[in-house]
Image: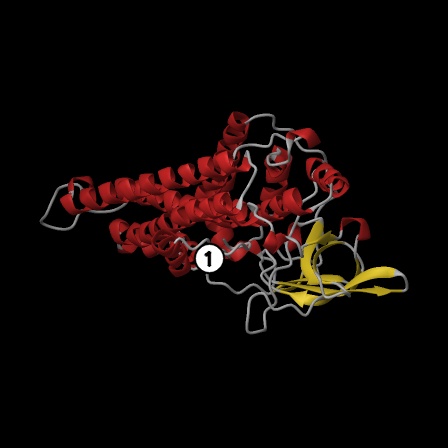
Amino acid sequence: MTPPIAKQSPRGLEERLPSSPSRPHLIFSDAEAIEIAHSLAVHLAEGACARGRDRILPWQELELFTASGLGGITVPRQFGGADVSHETLARVFAILAAADASVAQIPQKQFGVLALVREAASSEQQARIYDDILAGHRIGNAGPERHGRAITHLTTRVTRIGGKLKLTGRSYYSTGSIFAHWIPTRTIDEAERPVLAWVRRDAPGVQVVDDWEGLGQGTTASGTVIFDAAPVEEELLIDLAPLPARPGLIGPRSQIIQAAIDLGIAAGAVESALDFVRTKTRAWPYTVETVTDDPYIIGEVGRLELDLHAAEEVLARAGRTLDRIAAGPVTDESSAEASVAVAEAEILTTEIALEAAERLLELAGSSATRESYNLGRFWRDARVHTLHDPVRWKYHLLGNYTLNCVLPRRHQWN
């Protein structure tokens, strides 16, 4: 007998499937996307503390996100989407992540795949995929394999069985797959070429295992996907072999969202710190009458605000750089410029996310460490999410480009 799904989503095989897609609201402009993001963030913030503390997977919140139309804002205009600017895209994700970083990270994978579709898919494949997105389908992710010496190591394979393409293998870091309708997967075909294979979440041979054990970003359910001769949508098989030799913006488009999520974590931590200090923190004895008069706290708050605003501006500048370069044609040099601009943003957003999350608890005081407040979620989320793209390599990328004129390697993390 299949066990019922518990409220707190016990770890193990996830039996629940996403509801059938229903056509979302269609967003037409950048301003509308930002307005809707602010409205949705209010709903996400309401239950973020409890979801993080009790590990309640955000099924309802993902449905609200999809219904809002935000999932389709990068669909090109010729296919019916708003095709918002990269600056707007980053701002939308920062707004959502300030409310709940886990919910914001889940659709990041969808936008990363859509960036790849824009550059690598045929016009027929684009039309099919974009139409599905605008119809309310969600894209998940079957990420890197858990074992192997390199993150790019792949044993997952597409093979032809009985005349049909089948996918077999096991992937981890599969953020969003539990909630998805499609699970696209980087894999190897029978000719040993890298391809992106598309498999339905509800297809036979697909199992999603909720075994994510990260100390932060706990409700992303970034666990395992198992493919056991799962049927592949042959018409959507995308050849990835030409990409490394072709200048493009797949990596920067994906990474600017990661930077935006870190910025959102920082903004959420700063706002929570200000609220807690104003309403709950007590002044240190024999110093000042009210904690908001504490000169050391005032100074720390000023520094946090300055660092936060600096990161916001560099992220916005990176978005504008991508917008200019995307107008094309994209060259080796302009692709490198985009990667460098996003790396600069990732450095600052990483550092302010970690700093703000740490200072939150220090400024708010010992009472802020109570589990009921769950303010530690900001530090846990920042610590886990910023590890996606190690900042030490962003410094190296930036320094090597500036000092030695070395163009960054083109891949999904650059």
- SS assignment at label 1: loop
State the quadrant of the N terminus.
bottom right
Residue depicted at x 56% and y 26% = 29
Q: Mark 1 belongs to which amino acid?
A: Asp
For residue 305, say whether it is visible: yes
**Left or right: 289 in relation to 200:** left
Q: Residue at x 54, y 37 (%)?
A: 326
Q: In this view, does 123 lie to the left or right of 359?
A: right
Where on the picture, by quarter, is residue 383?
bottom left
Q: In this view, does 222 lie above or below 352?
A: below
Q: Which of 104 and 199 is in front in this view?
A: 199
**Count of numbered labels shown in the rendering:** 1
Q: Which of 403 and 222 is in front in this view?
A: 403
Q: Which residue is drawn at 62% across and 33% down?
A: 69
Q: Give x and y (percent) for residue 156.
A: 70, 67
Across and down, in percent, residue 257 comes to: 50, 45
Write down the residue under mark 1. Answer: 389
Q: Position of residue 288 (x, y in %)?
A: 12, 44
Relative horizontal placement of residue 218, taking residue 191 as reference (left or right): left
- Judge left or right: residue 98 versus residue 21: left
Residue drawn at point x = 67 percent, y = 50 percent: 180
Q: Residue furthest left?
A: 286
Q: Splitting the image into 4 quarters, where does residue 62 fall? A: top right
Q: Measuring from the top left, give residue 311's x and y in whole percent.
A: 35, 43
* Label 1 crowd (10 A; few <14 / some 14-19 / many >=20): some
> Residue 329, relative to residue 103: is it above or below?
above
- Which color scheme does this rendered protein use? secondary structure
Taking depth in this image into account, of 137 and 318 the one nearest to the observer is 318
Q: Can residue 200 be seen in this view?
A: no
